[in-house]
Amino acid sequence: MIQELPTASVVVVNYNTRERTLTCLRSLADQQIRGLEIVVVDNGSTDGSAVQIAREVPEAVMIEAGENLGFARGVNRGVAAASGDYVILLNPDTTVLPGSLEALLEFAVTHPEHGLYGGRTVTPDGDLDPRSCWGAPTLWSLLCFATGASTAFKGSTLLDPESLGSWQRDTVREVPIVTGCLLLMKTEDYRRMGGMDERYFLYGEDADFSLRAAAAGHRPVLVPGAVIVHDVGVSTSSSGQKMCMVMAGKSTLLRQHWASPRRELGLLFLVIGTALRTVLERPAAGSDRKTWTTVWRRRRDWMPGYPHAERALFGRHLRSD
């Protein structure tokens, strides 16, 4: 056990999730890290979040963005204000279990060769939520999506490779992608990388960040002793809108990281997979939950990727600083 850990700053981006964010921030009280700094970026919430958080967690550094910056820009704004040796990105819809951030930070100090660190996520019922990390997309994984194999054989190492198979996230393991719900890095390394790519609005930015980190020589790793409870997607009200943003993130990732003709083939697989799921979704008579029908109908909005998708899906331009 390290006698004295370095300092750390936790960055939380809040958007109309006042009570859930407060629960998240309260869970940080059980983390025994010297000088743990809390930085909250409020993305123009209309539910009184900024006032309530400032009242109940007065020690937090509160940054009021005045508008919805999205995740990448919000996180970067928070990291810019952070003073800790390490920065920890944490979703507002999470609860940190006691000792988890210490475990994550101690592992980072004793294994500096990795550079980028994630943890284990569980559902409110205590079951594994595998979405704390992912495999990188490949032509094979996108072909599995296009044919429906990744859905029919969910969790298969062969046919759903991005899920990383049946691994329970209970062992230390290097992974291609650490998600932004719990991500730790040296603050200077984060800033040296230029932070999250601000072209992304929501979804995909952590995949891009992990791939860029690996390209820079880091070895992203999952630390099972760092555990959070994750209530997925509490700030996204529409499943169709959320999936459109997910697909916009995937499209942007392929456009940035893949060269032609691999890129065009990958994008085609995204469209084919969307069409297949739309066809299979339609027979569900009486259901108001037409996620893939919405994604198909709005394919011209998300297919070009960000920043086009942000304007098309939200009907606005981000205000200049």
Image (spheres, rainbow, N blue to C red):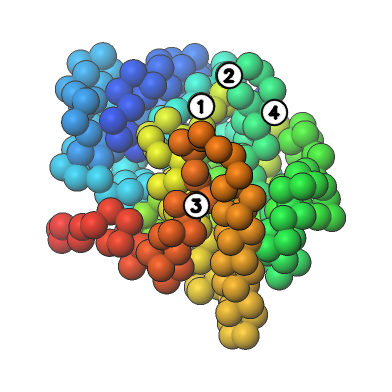
Q: Mark 2 and mark 4 in contact (Cβ < 8 Å)?
A: no
Q: Tell me the residue that label 2 is attached to.
A: 124
Label 3, residues with CA under 10 Å away: few <14, some 14-19, many ≥20: some
Tag 4: residue type? Answer: Leu
| Spot occupied by residue 319 in the image (x, y as percentages of width and height) | 16, 57
Task: Check residue 128 in the rendering and tell me which mark sits there, or answer none.
Answer: 4
Q: CA distance from mark 2 to mark 1?
A: 7 Å
Indicate the quadrant containing the C terminus: top left, top right, bottom left or bottom right.
bottom left
Q: Tell me the residue that label 3 is attached to.
A: 293
Q: Tell me the residue that label 1 is attached to.
A: 231
Q: Does the image show residue 12?
A: no
Mark 1 or 3: in front is 3
| Spot occupied by residue 191 in the image (x, y as percentages of width and height) | 40, 56
Q: Secondary structure at mark 2?
A: loop
Who comes first in sequence, dot 2 or dot 1?
A: 2
Tag 3: residue type? Answer: Thr
Label 1, residues with CA under 10 Å away: few <14, some 14-19, many ≥20: some
Residue at 27%, 61% (x, y): give it: 311
Who comes first in sequence, dot 1 or dot 3?
A: 1
Tag 2: residue type? Answer: Pro
